[in-house]
Image (cartoon, rainbow, N blue to C red):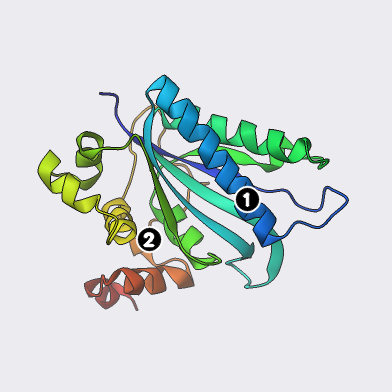
Amino acid sequence: MRRQVMWAAHLNVGNSGKYPITMEGIRKAVRADLENVTRIATECNFHCLIGYVLSDTDPKTGSKVHPHCHMIIFGTPASTIAKTIKAYWVHYWSTRGYNISPIHNRIRLVCTDGIISYMWAQRHGNFCIRLINYGPQYASELFQCDVDAASYYLRPQGLTRNVLLALLDYMDEDEKHPISVTDFPMIREFKRPYDSAYLRYLGVLDDYKKQP
């Protein structure tokens, strides 16, 4: 089994068409994209979980921006899955008359857990988790447990919280792609105001003793 890693997809439309983009329009596009990648994953034997949020807020300023979507892809082959998601997104909106720039729809390897609190802070609605061919034998790597315990953590009840807790402190230190200054800071470094709020949401309380 190939090592599982995390990739991110930042999916935007902006103001590139005749009609303004709505949150419902973004939601429909995400749904179609997930259906497409699920079909391809089944055909190609890909395995992953996808976490995503819809947003119309800048988490740094709190100001309103164009509706968009952020995704994380954890599994194998995560890079191929991320590229599939981006390609479908560009195709979906282009066929509807929008001038979508692939440059403004970014995918990248994720080396720290900081992207998750970044996503959580700007979510419009829920932080959603989608499992795609991601059974206990794959989830055991995520949850660092045996297959039986992984089956328990994958139950629909509590799934989102279980996944977010499992990804807390995630760090990919593979020498082939070391952490760079462009990566998100680790959540427990508390460099952003929403990091502590995110840990409070997860019920991780002891960490607040580390704050000044």
- The one of 183 and 9 positioned closer to us in this rendering: 9
Give the residue drawn at x 57%, y 58%.
Answer: 54
Q: Is residue 161 left or right of residue 30?
A: left
Which amino acid, by three-letter code, is at mark 2?
A: Ile
On screen, residue 166 above or below 78: below
**Image-quadrant location for residue 75:** top left
Question: Between marks 2 and 1, how big is the CA–CA gap?
Answer: 31 Å
- Does residue 146 appear anywhere in the picture? no
Residue 94 occupies quadrant: top right
> Could you tell me which quadrant the C terminus lies in?
bottom left
Element class at badge 2: helix
Q: Which residue is mark 2?
A: 187
Secondary structure of the residue carrying numbered label 1: helix
Q: Bin the neighbour count of mark 1 within 10 Å (Cα to Cα): few under 14, some 14-19, many 20 and up.
A: few
Label 2 Cα crowd, 10 Å radius (few <14 / some 14-19 / many 20+): many
In this view, the residue in front, 129 or 165, is 129
Whether residue 154 appears in this view of the structure is: yes
Residue 194 % position (x, y): 46, 70
Residue farthest to the top, as pictured: 44
User: In the rendered structure, are the residues bearing label 2 and label 1 in contact, judged by CB atoms less than 8 Å apart?
Assistant: no
Task: Kindly identify the residue that appears in the image at 38 percent across and 56 percent down.
Answer: 186
What residue is disc 1 on? 28
Residue 120 point in image, percent of width and height:
47, 63
Q: Which residue is at 25% across, 77% downward?
A: 209
Q: Which residue is found at the position 25% from the left and 23% from the top?
A: 1
Query: 64 or 26, which lies in front?
Result: 26
- Of the image marks 2 and 1, the number of the one nearer the N terminus: 1
Relative image position of residue 115 (x, y in whole percent): 46, 53
At label 1, which amino acid type do we have? Lys
